[in-house]
Structure formats: structure tokens, C-alpha cells
Image: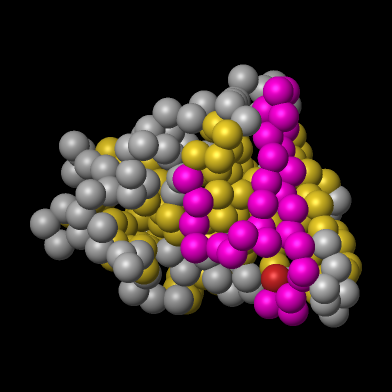
Amino acid sequence: ETGVTQSPTHLIKTRGQQVTLRCSSQSGHNTVSWYQQALGQGPQFIFQYYREEENGRGNFPPRFSGLQFPNYSSELNVNALELDDSALYLCASSGGRANEKLFFGSGTQLSVL
Amino acid sequence: GESVGLHLPTLSVQEGDNSIINCAYSNSASDYFIWYKQESGKGPQFIIDIRSNMDKRQGQRVTVLLNKTVKHLSLQIAATQPGDSAVYFCAEEPSSNNNDMRFGAGTRLTVKP
């Protein structure tokens, strides 16, 4: 059984650029959730994808968007990067049912200069 | 809005002692809670979960207590070891429509030898 994998592990961008982060879900999982974790903070929910559709969104602007593919892998896209977007971006997968634990990847550390 | 929070940002214990990490939640509709452990450079790792129809659940060296009356959650770690040093997050599932989890700010546990 393969776990959740994310790429890249680290990324440096400049303000105004666009970035795409990738996530492969754990085998057997059809739901992917994305979180932003600023330094010293808890993960903040960005959105969730279930069967290729957005299935819930946190308090993030539209420049944060995502995709889920038929194999349940997912991308997080952020346009017009701002300095405050610097954070650890975490992907988690699950079976999509209520009361089910999320399995997290190790994250992508994004630095915006 | 309602959010998950923690009483103490840091906790330092002696190796071999028991640790208690507390969490207050305010969303009375939440019916599922998880404790996660996050080590430096890694994603959150599942420790133990509890549903709202339970008051207590035990795992290996860990116990989670849920007090719905005062909306309080705690994690007890028995015989704390140096490998337990990490940041601990409680998370709640505010809706049964999807299983996006909402996290608190975390408590850093340091185990002194």
C-alpha cells in the first residue's frame, strides 16, 4: 500500500507568479483534501476534491484552485502569488466518508520572495 | 466563526512521566475528533480518534477523553518517551457532508531526558 506522496518537496517562487503542486492519494482513496500550514500554525483547510469535483472549500480566495484526475491524484494551483502564501502545503487523502481519518503527505514547502 | 483551539502552546515533561494535552472546541455540531502528531519536516500523523457518542478511547500508550458538556478534548500519553516530542494537533469534523477536518493551533510537547 503506497502512502500519500507530494511533489515537489520544496519550491521557491516570486510574487505574482503561479505555482502548481501535485499529490498522489493513498491506494484505495478517492478523496483529496488540501491544507495550508503557516509556520507555527495548524493546517488550514483549503478545499476537498471527491470524484473529480470540489466538495467543500475553506476561506481561501479564488486564486487558489484545484483539480482531481480520474486516478484520484490532485493538483493545487495558486495564481498571483503573494508573500503570505509562503507556507507548507499539505495534501491528505481518505475514502470520502464522514468520520474517517485523513492520511497526510509530507507536504510542499513553498517560499514566495 | 467556530474554531478548534488549544489551552497551552507548549508542554515540557520528564521522560517517563505522563503527558496531558488539552483542546477546546466550539462547534457543537462536530461529531468526530482526531489527534495528530507532527514531527519537524513531516506531515501530520494520525494518533487516535473518537466519535461524539464516546467519552473515552484508548490506544497504545494514548488515551483520548471527550467531554461534550464543556466541549473539551484531551490526549493523554503514558510513560512519555523522547520520540513523543512533536507538535500535537486536535482536529474536528464540523460537517458530516464531507470529512474535511479543522485543526487547532497545536501544542509543542518536549520530553526531557
Q: Quadrant of residue A113?
A: bottom right
Q: What residue sits 26% from the left and 43% below the top?
A: B31
Q: Quadrant of residue A97?
A: top left
**Residue A112 appears left or right of A65:** right
Q: In the current view of this chain or complex, which residue is farthest to the left?
A: B69
The percent coordinates of residue A4 (x first, y second) are 69, 36
Colouring mode (rainbow / by chain / secondary structure / one colour): secondary structure
Q: What residue sits 61% from the left and 49% below the top?
A: A34
Would residue B66 be seen by someone viewing this image from the given angle?
A: yes
Position of the N terminus of chain A, as image quadrant, is top right
Q: What residue sits 67% from the left and 61% below the top?
A: A63
The percent coordinates of residue B95 (x first, y second) are 33, 44
**Residue B3 appears left or right of B45:** left
**Residue B104 appears left or right of A8:** left
A95 or B105: nearer the eye? Answer: A95
Using the image, determine if residue B67 lies above or below residue A75: below
The percent coordinates of residue A71 (x first, y second) are 72, 23
Say how many tags the image has.
0
Based on the picture, tell me whether residue A7 belongs to the magenta stretch. Answer: no
B39 or B32: nearer the eye? Answer: B32
Based on the picture, tell me whether residue A79 belongs to the magenta stretch. Answer: yes
Would residue B39 be seen by someone viewing this image from the given angle?
A: no
**Residue A40 appears left or right of A9:** left
A89 or B79: nearer the eye? Answer: A89
The percent coordinates of residue B64 (x first, y second) are 32, 48
Magenta region: A56-84
Q: What residue sits 18% from the left and 37% below the top?
A: B53
